[in-house]
Amino acid sequence: MPSQVILSVISMVLHSDVPLHSALFTKITAAMLLTVVVVVVVALVVHRCMMRRCTSTRSLAGMTAIVTGASAGIGKETAKDLAKRGARVILACRNQTKAQLVADYIISVTGNKNVVVCLLDTSDLSSVRSFAEEVLKTEGAIHILVNNAGIGGKEIQEITCDGFDLTMATNYYGHFLLTNLLLKRLKESAPSRVVNVSSLAHFFVWRLNLKDLNFKKRSYSLLKAYSQSKLCNILFSLELAEKLRGSGVVVNSLHPGTINSEFVRDEMVMSWWRKPFLLFARIMLRLLGKDSELGAQTTIHLAVSEEVEGVTGKYFDECKEATSSWLAQNSGLAKALWEITEADVQLAPCEIFY
């Protein structure tokens, strides 16, 4: 898969431990550069020709949708599309000022005035609980929940007020708790859909350490944390889909595509020799990777398309069902992760509706 190739190249650059001045280093550098120039360019050109769009024209009039992390990127584009279809859209964001500007923009381009902002920081469980409490008071129905909010990871690990790794909290724990807190309303509003944004990066995880999900006893890296959080999103989707089978609520996950500089962050601190490779990757991704509007298409497809009506527990890429990693298909692992996460977020018996 082309996007898997480019992520593998970036991963190889970020994690190489070859000594800087060795002859072997020089040869490997030349080989890697040639590989990047030839393989990545060809792969991305082919991949761009294969990009698909959601073709559904379905109206969402009378329906309510929540999109987390909707103030930028694919979250913003997803929210705009749902609003264009007539849905009441709640932008669940941690920066209310920025989100309100986006809401005003969406209202202006869609003509749908039923777009509102509600404060949500998925890295903070108290914020998640406050958001859920507010939404359950104001919304009589929830038909679509898009768990999109996320961060690419931190070069230096940060721990949240709840004791979680920041990347895991933002990308996984917060959405796990949020979905469970809204589950009763989602079931009451059936047919309804939960869409979890994951990433192809989940393929980088070969073993999930259930005893140390927050990197307290093992080495941490940006890529490890990000990849693990995205694997957890798929496993979460797999187990929730099983728990909700027959309820009218479907749950699916997706890879949005390689979107511009998804992994190549300006603020990353790294050895100087790695930077030329990452600069090249950034340029290629900006030229040939997806923009946010294209990147949102699979999310939109899972949220609205009639083609996936009744489909649950699946992983999608380019608006079609795809194969996730062998680890992401392990139902026993998904169940074990669920039980650990449920305890970690302190989900009370009165909050369980599956």
Image: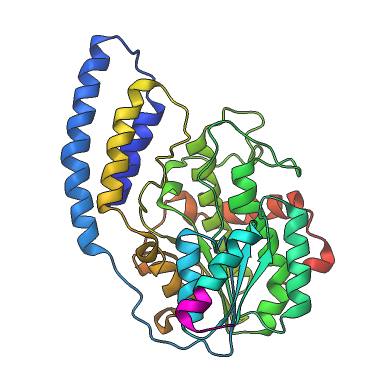
Residue segment shown in magenta:
106-113
Question: The C terminus is located in which quarter?
Answer: bottom right
Q: Quadrant of residue 114?
A: bottom right
Asked if 47 appears above or below 138 in the picture, the reply is above
Return the x and y of residue 325 as percentages of the image width and height. Answer: 42, 51
Return the x and y of residue 259 as percentages of the image width and height. Answer: 37, 53
Question: What's the residue at 79%, 77% (across, down)?
Answer: 137
- Magenta span has 259? no
Question: What's the magenta bit mostly, secondary-structure-wise?
Answer: helix
Question: What's the residue at 35%, 43% (across, down)?
Answer: 7
Judged left or right of residue 222, residue 214 is right
Asked if 133 appears above or below 323 in the picture, the reply is below
Return the x and y of residue 345 as percentages of the image width and height. Answer: 75, 52
Q: Is residue 210 visible?
A: yes
Question: What's the residue at 69%, 42% (across, down)?
Answer: 164
Judged left or right of residue 184, residue 37 is left
Q: How is the image coloured?
A: rainbow
Q: Quadrant of residue 194?
A: bottom right
Asked if 165 appears above or below 51 in the picture, the reply is above
**Frontmost residue, 123 versus 98:** 98
| Tally of marks | 0
Return the x and y of residue 45 as percentages of the image width and height. Answer: 19, 53
Q: Is residue 311 visible?
A: no
Q: Quadrant of residue 346?
A: bottom right
